[in-house]
């Protein structure tokens, strides 16, 4: 047979050989057949990547899957005619479950309109997630519609690490979503947590969420267990003191009017700063300081020698030099370090008795060789001590 003159005509259904001619026939699938074949296959979704699909007739569904890691939060988006970028023609919904059958979304209607507010869930275990997408046709129901759509998923770790003094911008995009953060713990350290949101934030900010926090040490020790108690924390940050090096964990939720916490959405930012629980005062030098939020107490230490007289001065709004405009009304509590080997710890246990201490200063004679702790708090009119804020300065001298 002369191969150069052989004729090949391809048919999928059958082939016939006539002499030196080989005839084969192929039936080219229609567009609808291609769509039906694609919908019959399960597709593994890739993170942050849209998959575009289409239904050509009623009865069609499309199956997807992806793998999750325990503890991570996942978001599944649908771009369709009801909620999307105006380019899709199908009205679609999802049924979502773990491979063991545990439901994440029990019906198509419970996971539709997922473009602006995606379906979100926290993975309780690692494994495969199964998704079935179907289209809705008015008056006929699910798995009856046709048209185009797109689907994608994104994820975030269970905890994001906050960096000290840096604002972290974030977003709550779906009802029921909470964002979690971790902060390295430092023993005997005061922490200040700031929130920039729609209720209390920078005048230049355009944040849209009303955020509250719950705060724990290693998910066990409660620092703040109610969102209300740690909200509106821009001008007056939430503050607390740690006693260990254990990790601090924060849960952020958004408030929605008439619905409550964990029901809102929007943008916000978080930041934290720290200071030691105790600052060592240098003898004879003014130390400028600030109380930035109610409930804050600034603590200082001085080492004293038995028999010496110590004088503590305060420059504040009530009694000061007049050169610098201080804004806090400060009082002191003074006591020996509880770890000291002394019989009596208290030197002054009333803020009011150690206030207005610019001239004359508060004086005491040391009864022991020990460390003395000075606690400074600010007074707020009509509310009392430890509830004010503002600036002041403090120093001490020694008369031997």
Image: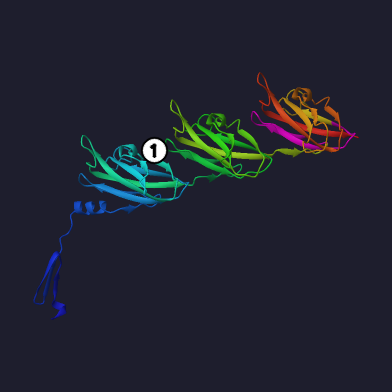
Q: Is residue 106 located in the magenta-colored stretch of the structure?
A: no
169, 108: nearer the viewer? 108
Q: Position of residue 365 (x, y in %)?
A: 87, 30
Q: Residue at x 45, y 26 (%)?
A: 257
Is 280 rendered above or below residue 331? below
Q: Which residue is mark 1?
A: 117
Mark 1: give few (<14), some (14-19) or many (20+) Cα within 10 Å. some
Q: Position of residue 136 (x, y in %)?
A: 25, 39
- 86 relative to 345 in the view: left or right: left
In the picture as drawn, the residue positioned furthest to the top comes out as 382
Quarter of the image holding residue 229? top right
- 328 relative to 128 in the view: left or right: right
Q: Position of residue 388 (x, y in %)?
A: 67, 25
Quarter of the image holding residue 186? top right
For mark 1, give the secondary structure. loop
Q: Residue at x 52, y 38 (%)?
A: 251
336, 147: nearer the viewer? 336
Q: Quadrant of the N terminus?
A: bottom left
Q: Quadrant of the C terminus?
A: top right
Q: Position of residue 9 (x, y in %)?
A: 14, 68
Q: Residue at x 28, y 54 (%)?
A: 41
In the picture as drawn, the residue positioned furthest to the front comes out as 100
- 165 relative to 133 in the view: left or right: right
Q: Residue at x 52, y 32 (%)?
A: 212
Whether residue 13 is visible here, answered yes or no, is yes
Numbered range of the magenta stretch: 284-310
Whether residue 197 is visible here, answered yes or no, is no
Image coloring type? rainbow
- 265 relative to 53 in the view: left or right: right
Label total for image: 1
């Amino acid at each position: 047979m002369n191969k150069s003159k052989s004729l090949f005509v391809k048919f999928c259904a059958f082939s016939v050989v006539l002499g030196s001619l080989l005839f084969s026939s192929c039936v080219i699938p229609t567009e609808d057949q291609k769509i039906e074949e694609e919908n019959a296959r399960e597709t593994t979704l890739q993170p942050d990547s849209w998959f575009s699909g289409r239904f050509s007739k009623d009865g069609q569904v499309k199956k997807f899957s992806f793998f999750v890691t325990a503890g991570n939060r996942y978001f599944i988006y649908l771009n369709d005619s009801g909620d999307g970028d105006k380019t899709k023609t199908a009205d679609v919904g999802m049924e979502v479950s773990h491979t063991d059958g545990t439901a994440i979304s029990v019906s198509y209607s419970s996971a539709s309109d997922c473009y602006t507010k995606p379906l979100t869930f926290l993975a309780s275990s690692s494994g495969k997630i199964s998704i079935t997408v179907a289209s809705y046709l008015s008056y006929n129901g699910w798995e009856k519609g046709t048209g185009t759509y797109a689907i994608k998923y994104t994820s975030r770790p269970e905890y994001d690490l906050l960096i000290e003094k840096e604002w972290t911008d974030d977003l709550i995009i779906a009802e029921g979503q909470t964002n979690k953060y971790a902060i390295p713990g430092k023993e005997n350290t005061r922490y200040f947590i700031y929130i920039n949101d729609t209720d209390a934030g920078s005048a230049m900010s355009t944040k849209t969420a009303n955020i509250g926090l719950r705060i724990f040490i290693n998910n066990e020790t409660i620092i703040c267990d109610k969102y209300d108690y740690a909200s509106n924390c821009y001008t007056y940050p939430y503050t607390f003191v740690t006693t260990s090096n254990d990790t601090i964990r924060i849960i952020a939720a958004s408030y929605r009017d008439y619905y409550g916490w964990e029901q809102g959405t929007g943008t916000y930012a978080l930041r934290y700063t720290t200071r030691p629980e105790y600052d060592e005062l240098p003898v004879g030098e003014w130390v400028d300081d600030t109380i930035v939020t109610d409930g804050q107490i600034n603590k200082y230490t001085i080492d004293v020698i038995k028999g010496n007289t110590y004088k503590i001065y305060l420059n504040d709004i009530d009694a000061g030099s007049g050169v610098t405009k201080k804004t806090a009304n400060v009082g002191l509590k003074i006591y020996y370090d509880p770890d000291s080997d002394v019989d009596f710890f208290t030197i002054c246990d009333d803020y009011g008795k150690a206030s207005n201490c610019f001239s004359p200063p508060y004086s005491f004679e040391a009864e022991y060789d020990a460390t003395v702790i000075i606690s400074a708090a600010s007074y707020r009119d009509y509310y009392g001590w430890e509830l004010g804020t503002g600036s002041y300065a403090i120093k001490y001298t020694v008369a031997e």
